[in-house]
Amino acid sequence: MAKNIVVTGAGGFIGGHLVNDLRQQGHTVRAVDIKPLEEWYQRFDDVESLSLDLDLRDACVQAVDGMDTVYNLAANMGGMGFIEHNKALCMLSVLINTHMCVAAQEEGIDRFFFASSACVYNADKQKDPNVTALKEEDAYPALAEDGYGWEKLFSERMCRHFREDYGLTTRVARYHNVYGPNGTYSGGREKAPAAICRKVIQAKLDGTNEIEVWGDGKQTRSFMYIDDCVKGTQMIMESDILEPINLGSSELVSINQLVDIAEEVAGIKVKRNYNLSAPKGVNGRNSDNALINKHLGWEPSIRLRDGIERTYAWIYDQMTSNQPALV
Ligand code: NAD
């Protein structure tokens, strides 16, 4: 059945893809982002697109007016280089989720989704590159990523208490590293997969065949391709899963292995200059998918090699043409 859906953060990476998928299913979509429309990563003629600052309560009221479903993806975020240096700014995203919850409850919204993050997990559980995959319960006792992770953890609980106290139906996914085309690949907010692709492409284009890698390359992560993220987000939204749940790939790789894959796709070998003083985040992080498998009989499954091939191709096109990233 067609719904009236508002997606916040729609001018960004995941929001843009989600809007596209929802409109293709025949839903009426309102897309909202603070960025001026010409800076959105994806925009669609058949979607109402609003440039609003959702830190403000009135803007949140306007965003949800007449809608029945909310996907709240708006946040100030970026890769490690960004979140380590912008803790206060990341914490200010608490205004967005707070005002969106209040507005959604007042509007009588049917379902409300909040995009949380693996950065909520206790840092002590992520010291070893041979990490034991993180289970949902590992967020407590709380020792989240400073700034960004604490905001996500607090906002998760806000969703929980709006559900328990006010009857707002909330769903929360903890995304683990999402990557793909139409995302940030330069400028300081990019995350590891896009950054590595960009550096390898640059090394190939200017013939230096040399890249900088943050940390010693031994830190481990899992990376979820955008199509899995968009699918899983909607499955969680439609489910009866009340507590925050992991949405991530369980294909664990080191950053060095990520570089290996980018090299393979590029068809070159690069010299790796390790920058040990650059932000590198926790030593190891992976997604335990037992719970999502139990509830949905599904988990993200797109192989990193396949996803990087598509992401590399898109970034390559962006870097070698002057076309804006709009469709
Ligand atoms: P993104 O930066 O591409 O998109 C977020 C969007 O929110 C941006 O376009 C930004 O302009 C918008 N925004 C920020 N402040 C706003 C405000 N005050 N009002 C309106 N819009 C505002 O990031 P993304 O990768 O698409 O992430 C989407 C969501 O998923 C975020 O909540 C993020 O924290 C979460 N998340 C993403 C990842 C990932 O790997 N990409 C991992 C974990 C969690």
Image: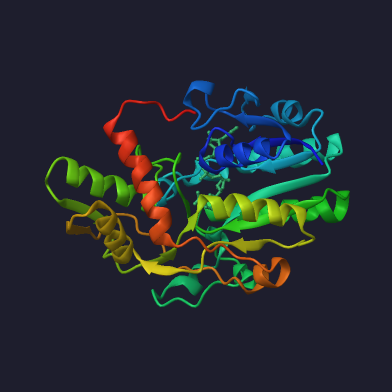
Where in the figure is residue 300, as x and y percent of width and height? 56, 62
Q: Would residue 253 appear left or right of 200 to someone viewing this image?
A: right
Quick check: can you spot residue 125?
Answer: yes
Where in the figure is residue 175, as x and y percent of width and height? 57, 56
Identify which residue, 121 or 136, lies in the foreground: 136
23 w.r.t. 299: above or below: above
Look at the image and tell me in which quarter the N terminus lies: top right
Q: Would residue 79 appear left or right of 34 to someone viewing this image?
A: left
Of all residues, the one furthest to the left in this rendering is 208
Identify which residue, 165 or 168, lies in the foreground: 168
Question: Which quadrant would residue 219 be assigned to in this image?
Answer: bottom left
The quarter of the picture showing ligand 1: top right
Quick check: can you spot residue 214?
Answer: no
Q: Would residue 79 appear left or right of 296 to someone viewing this image?
A: left
Question: Which quadrant would residue 17 be assigned to in this image?
Answer: top right
Q: Residue at x 63, y 74 (%)?
A: 290
Question: Which quadrant would residue 228 be assigned to in this image?
Answer: bottom right
Q: Would residue 72 appear left or right of 104 to someone viewing this image?
A: left
13 w.r.t. 79: above or below: above
* Number of marks: 0
Where in the figure is residue 213, as x and y percent of width and height? 25, 56
Q: Residue at x 43, y 30 (%)?
A: 325
Where in the figure is residue 43, as x and y percent of width and height? 55, 28
Q: Residue at x 40, y 26 (%)?
A: 324
Identify which residue, 100 or 124, lies in the foreground: 100
67 w.r.t. 176: above or below: above
Colouring style: rainbow
